[in-house]
Amino acid sequence: MTDHDDLTRPIGDAPALPPVPGATAHGRDEGSARGRLGSRSLGAVLGLTVANTVVPGTAYLASGRRKLGAAVLVVFLLLVAGGVWLATAGQRTAARLLVDPTSLDWVLAGIVAVALAWVLVVVTGYRSLLPRRSSRPRLAVGALLVVALVAAVAYPAYRVGTVAVAQRGLLDGLFGDDRQSATVDDAADPFGSKERVNVLLLGGDGGEGREGVRTDTVIVASIDTDTGDTTLFSLPRNLEDLPFPADSPLAALYPNGFDAGSESESLLNSVYRNGPAAHPDVLGPTDDPGADFLKLGVGEALGLDIDYFVLVNLDGFSRLVDALGGITVDVNYYVPINGITGEELPDDYIAPGPDQHMDGYTALQFARGRYGLTDYDRMDRQRCAIKAIIDAADPITLLEQYQELAATTQDIVSTDIPRSALDDFVDLAFLVKDAEVRSVVFDTSLINPAYPDYDLMRRIVSDSLAPAAAASASAAPAASSTAPAGSGDQAPGAGDATAGDATPGQTPAAPTTTPAAEVGDACAYDPVRAQAALDAGEPPSKNG
């Protein structure tokens, strides 16, 4: 060692070297993150990109952009929490959104905004994961994955958007503000202080080869606005001499009840068509005079104020069923396809059997067939068909077919329920879902449809809606009540004689018990009854 070397040696402890500019803790984190990026494999990048699509913000956290990642993740979790709330505790709020056009517009805008933001997170998250130097094949594989993930985000958003647009169109078409009714007061508070809301449910049978629309199904749903408890009053299609309120212009035209000149054209199912045809403008401006005729007449017959009507035309029923992919029902006896009793044999029969899957045409025949059977048999099957439609309308099917379903609904359903009442009906629907539903069928055990005692019918309705009757279907005997119309094991009125078979002027025996009975599962398969029908053999038809 030379003296020169001694001059370069430090004397004592050497001082610490100064820090390298930028080598702070933050800088070390960034450097570490860049190091991880540079060493991250293609599989890890692709996996994190997929994870970032499922749980937005993951890619930002993995690439060291923690504040941004945390913010995106929090927003995502809030959206998920909101969706879970709407699907559970907030179902009523969700339903209200679906029946409000303005809210639907905001929902549609929100869907677009969320979808665009999600796509942006997917793309930028992937880019944040990429090493600075990546080969072209690696970039190509990543780009293909990103495109697929963007499509996976965009398609569901597109489908939900189309549902929102279709729902908006359905509201405009079915509950338009420009609809006119002679029997609806378009008040700001439609329900007001009403204890009950009465809705007339009509099933119209106006298809190919049929002149006009005949309402073969006439049911009044009387709903308690506080509890949702509902009583259904079913009227036979061949009810005669339908009365009208004394303060209605129709009472002056038909002082002895509805009469269109002949017995067959004066039945209840002909009022919708023949009343407005004879007196088109008697009730003033209205989009559906036939429904207004029936609301006034049926209301007077039952002693109720009918608030609204809903008409389902069987002419489009088959298209609705086909749009749902068919329905499944149980058949307990041979159901005729076409045919006119006493004139023309059916084309064929639907044989008894459980869990029969039907397309639109077959389902229509199931709901319509009446040859050799009673009106009450058909009314039962129509209720079963409606139940089967509800069962078939699962969320996935509704989402996939909603555009077609909405268009079909506009074609086959009409109503005078104003848009301002939809929120109230949403609340009422949630009450009805968990409430008691009972039924009174005015079959030949209660009345003679050819010579109806309307005073008796009004007393039956009044007793059925009385608090005591609502509390129990087995109230004490009363002069104004009657034997149960049916049970869950037998269709109400099944096997009864038709009104035409009743002795003129004869009235059924005085009622002795409460008429309303809980609605049972009349649609369930009855193997004993079905086997008896099979053993008896198929009835005569055109095919043999």
Image (tube, rainbow, N blue to C red):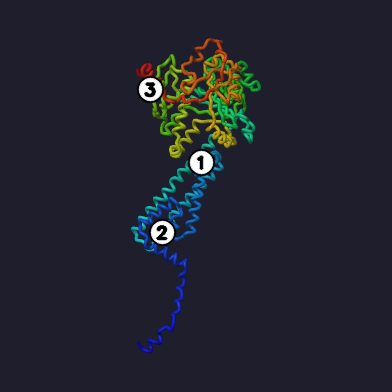
Residue 266 shows up from this direction: no
Specify the amino acid type for callout 1.
Answer: Thr
Which residue was labeled with disc 2? 129
Q: Report how far apart the C-alphas of labels 2 and 1 lie in the structure.
A: 37 Å
Quadrant housing the N terminus: bottom left
The one nearer the camera, 92 or 136, is 92
Residue farthest to the left? 137
Using a 10 Å C-alpha cutoff, classify the residue at mark 2 as few (fewer than 14 neighbours), some (14 to 19) or many (20 or more). many
Vertical position of residue 128 compared to residue 532: above or below: below
Give the quarter of the image for residue 369. Answer: top left
Lower sequence index among marks 3 and 1: 1
Helix, strand or loop status at disc 3? loop
Using a 10 Å C-alpha cutoff, classify the residue at mark 3 as few (fewer than 14 neighbours), some (14 to 19) or many (20 or more). some
Residue farthest to the front? 12
Q: From the top left corner, tell me how far across and down residue 56 is, in percent.
A: 45, 53
Q: Disc 2 vs disc 3: Cβ atoms closer than 8 Å?
A: no
Specify the amino acid type for callout 2.
Answer: Leu
Q: Is residue 225 left or right of residue 408?
A: right
Vertical position of residue 433 compared to residue 476: above or below: below
Q: Report how far apart the C-alphas of labels 3 and 1 lie in the structure.
A: 41 Å
Specify the amino acid type for callout 3.
Answer: Ala
Quadrant housing the C terminus: top left
The numbered disc on residue 88 is 1
Q: Nearer the viewer, mark 3 or mark 1?
A: 1
Which residue was labeled with disc 3? 351
Give the quarter of the image for residue 254. Answer: top right
Q: From the top left corner, tell me how far across and down residue 185 is, in percent.
A: 63, 31
Residue at the image position 56 percent from the left and 20 percent from the top: 514
